[in-house]
Image: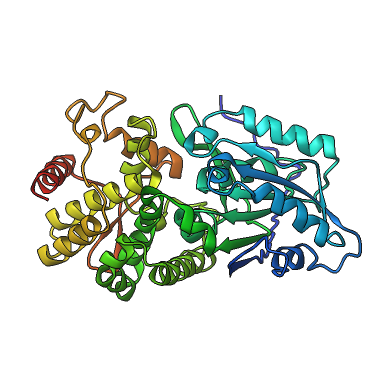
Amino acid sequence: MAIQQKTALTLQPINQRICVTFNYNVHFTKGLFQLDNPLLAQVIAAEGETTPKQLLVVVDGGFLHSQDRLLEKLLVYAQCYGDAIALAGEPMVVPGGEAVKNDTRFIEQIHQRINAAGLCRHSYVLAIGGGAVLDMVGYAATTAHRGIRLLRVPTTVLGQNDSGVGVKNGINAFGKKNFLGTFMPPYAVLNDFNFLTSLDDRDWRSGIAEAVKVALIKDADFFDFIMTNADKLANRDMDIMERLIYRCSQLHLEHIAGSGDPFEMGSSRPLDFGHWAAHKLEHLTNYSLRHGEAVAIGIALDTTYSYLTGQLLQSEWQMVMTTLSKLGFNLYVSALTEQLDRLDHPHCIFRGLTEFREHLGGKLTITLLQGIGQGIEVHKVDLSLYRDAILMLQDWELSH
């Protein structure tokens, strides 16, 4: 039955437009919790309030293994800068790594601590750790009181140059990466380069993948810097790493602020170049792959596909593959081919395309390369060519 339209009175819709400006600083320092470094206290006291602000601290337990006096330093620092900081109880220690995003109990525990301490929206949650812990704590902070001020202290390369500087928070659910989450910028990000010295080689290397990603789609000169210094990065040259983190952070922040879609209302997400496969690989390997390791494979796969479709020169494809290999990444894992020809199987890598489309907004949009430093968006892919690309990765790994 057709809906009868009222003719006596037609009310026009009320249009409302809300523009909200977010400002936050990404700081770079060394010795963040040393008493002669006032940066953290200055950030908390920046609004000029005369009373100390409550601060709930959540720390990555994995990070504490290499920083055994960190909790003691935090307590002494808070006492020294007591005019700005009032700790809301003992710091909360949570597991590090992707496991912390797979268990909602940690969200509940943070909410309980926030409630018990009586934190308000002008209080602070300080998250110290790797990207997974920052994601989880950010989700908890932004869902309490509709958002408590979040301070991020990334302790990994990946956190300092990518996940820790952006506007996204989230946890995993239903076997899908970041199924639950929020868009909420942090109050500030504080990167301490000294924390990187305690990383193992896998975590040192892992974050470099995100720098390769953003260089390939946005800045050919930056990729040349990475390619030229690949051996130094693999050998843990701190000066080169600091320069890489700064430029990578800058490119990520420029995109978030200047893309016109910081909260991803559309279906375009060029900063996730290589990620459709990476997210699926993390799940298929039960997260034994680090995020950056999976991203490196995803970059290699989409770069190879770009070459097979004629958008990328063979010499450019070889430069990307050689650079990733020099950095120490493996570019093939068996999960790529285990159920390759069974498209309906949940372990088929191509299921990652469907999940990526769902996560973005219903329309498949992935970024490929049409040159070094030149990303291009496509909405359809040829699965037979992607199969060929996967086999090329397998051959590359066997020959290198």
Query: Quadrant of the rendered structure where residue 215 is?
Result: bottom left
Q: Is residue 68 left or right of residue 91?
A: left
Query: Quadrant of the rendered structure where residue 236 is?
Result: bottom left
Residue at the image position 12 percent from the left and 50 percent from the top: 400
Q: Is residue 99 left or right of residue 213?
A: right
Residue 70: percent from the left, percent from the top? 64, 50
Residue 397: percent from the left, percent from the top? 14, 46
Q: Is residue 284 left or right of residue 361?
A: left
- Relative to 258, does residue 91 appear above or below in the rendering? above
Q: Is residue 311 visible?
A: no
Residue at the image position 26 percent from the left and 35 percent from the top: 350
- Which one is in front, 321 or 356? 321
Q: Is residue 273 visible?
A: yes
Residue 249: percent from the left, percent from the top? 48, 65
Residue at the image position 71 percent from the left and 63 percent from the top: 40
What's the image's color scheme? rainbow
Which quadrant, please, contains the N terminus?
top right
Residue 336: percent from the left, percent from the top? 22, 36
Total labels drawn: 0
Q: Residue furthest bottom?
A: 221
Q: Residue furthest right?
A: 50
- Which one is in front, 34 or 382? 34
Q: Is residue 365 left or right of residue 111?
A: left
- Which one is in front, 141 or 58? 58
Residue at the image position 74 percent from the left and 48 percent from the top: 148
